[in-house]
Amino acid sequence: MHPPRRELLFSLIIALLCTGLFFLDLAHIPPAPEGIRCRARITEVDNSKVRTHLIVKTNVQLLQVQLLSGPHKGQSMPVVNMLTGKMELDEFYETGATILVEYSAPEGKPVNAVARGSYRLGLQLFLIVLFGLLLFAVAGVTGLKAGLSFVFAALVLWKLFFPLLLMGYPPLPTGLGVVTLLTGVICFSVGGLTRRGLATFAGSMLGLLLTCGLATLFTHGFRLHGAVRPFAEMLLYSGYYNLNLTDIFIASVFIACSGAVMDLAMDIAATMDELKYRHPEMGLIEHMRSGLRVGRAVTGTMTTTLLLAYSGSHITMFMVFLAKGLPPANLLNAPFVAAEALNILVGSFGVIAVAPCTVVIAALLYRKQTPSAP
């Protein structure tokens, strides 16, 4: 089969899989409570029942809103905003704000309305469309395939991986299976069903297997448990007492770094492909040396990517330690800090290892044949 047709067929298969995953319900999750959800604009605010303790607000905020969408568009109704005292979960509204409202209408009249946060769905959709357009403008057809891979990865995690964990499947084998599937689809979608795609996939998997082994070893060595992750304890209280949170944490380590690993593997594989295309007479050793020189430069910046990504998501946590004047030993020895250190360092091991692995695999794949023009 001609390569472009083969890759088109592969993309169509991925699109069909995305459609199937969208309607998949493995864990038989209970349906969302019946109700109508729509946009609403706040017209009045009553804070008389709000209890303020320093900077924390609890109890209830009473709102009067005008519905902006849905079957009762234009009507006015009261809405309750429950305040739990947790600033990361609560929202406090003012007149004129647009929020998401959930209510019931048993006899055709809207009642029992509850605020579900500031309305963000429209802006999120705009960002998704903008992301897709920018991806296509920069990368063309390859960008479309990358976007399809993005959708497939999101659906696999949401519709396959998370439900399988809730059903009690072992996190490590399940995580490895899912990350293998995602790596294969992403690498062959972007790199094509070619030696470049094969080198990217093989190099990525070697790096991820190393990361999985090291994460397992050091998680137990650090005496960490999965409860260091946000909402882990809440998950247990939701009725899933038999979940192995430690193995879920280990799986999260190698899944989290898989994107950086694939990124570096694709850079190396594309470089090896271009080198062989421009210099078909290049020998095996020279080809490997050239690839390693590129790999060293790319690896140097990629390792800091994980450091900045993980550290940036925990800025306030580090600021708390500094504000309280706690010594560095206490900071580094804390379970949640040790967990992030493990994330950064073990993930960096995988990133570092993927460069020479991909170079060797690509050099062997291109040893006898000259690649076609990109």
Image (spheres, rainbow, N blue to C red):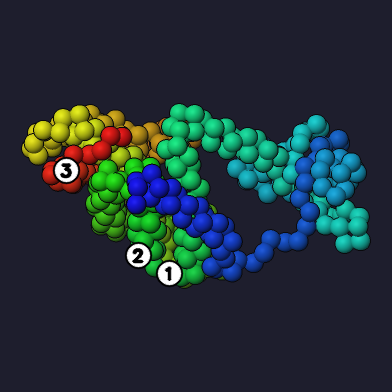
Relative image position of residue 193 (x, y in whole percent): 33, 48
What is the spatial separation of the Cα atoms under label 3 and label 1, in whole angstroms?
Answer: 43 Å
User: Residue at (55%, 56%) from the top-left corner?
Assistant: 19
Relative image position of residue 76 (x, y in whole percent): 90, 43
What is the spatial separation of the Cα atoms under label 3 and label 2, in whole angstroms?
Answer: 36 Å
Residue 41 in which image quadrant? top right
Q: 312 left or right of 59?
A: left
Q: Earlier in the sequence, mark 3 or mark 1?
A: 1
The secondary structure type at the circle numbered 1 is loop
Q: Nearer the viewer, residue 16 or 295?
A: 16
Relative image position of residue 159 (x, y in whole percent): 52, 59
**Which label is found at residue 369?**
3
> Given this view, does label 3 or label 1 mark the residue nearer the observer?
3
User: Residue at (77%, 46%) from the top-left corner?
Assistant: 38
Amino acid tagged 3:
Gln
Q: 305 left or right of 80?
A: left
User: Residue at (42%, 61%) from the top-left corner?
Assistant: 245
Q: Nearer the viewer, residue 188 or 48?
A: 188
Amino acid tagged 2:
Pro
Q: Nearer the viewer, residue 303 or 72?
A: 72
Which residue is tagged 2?
Answer: 173
| Marks 2 and 1 in Cβ contact (< 8 Å) | yes
Which residue is tagged 1?
Answer: 169
> Given this view, does label 3 or label 2 mark the residue nearer the observer?
3
Amino acid tagged 1:
Tyr
**Which label is found at residue 57?**
none
| Total labels drawn | 3
User: Residue at (43%, 32%) from the top-left corner?
Assistant: 139
| Marks 3 and 2 in Cβ contact (< 8 Å) | no
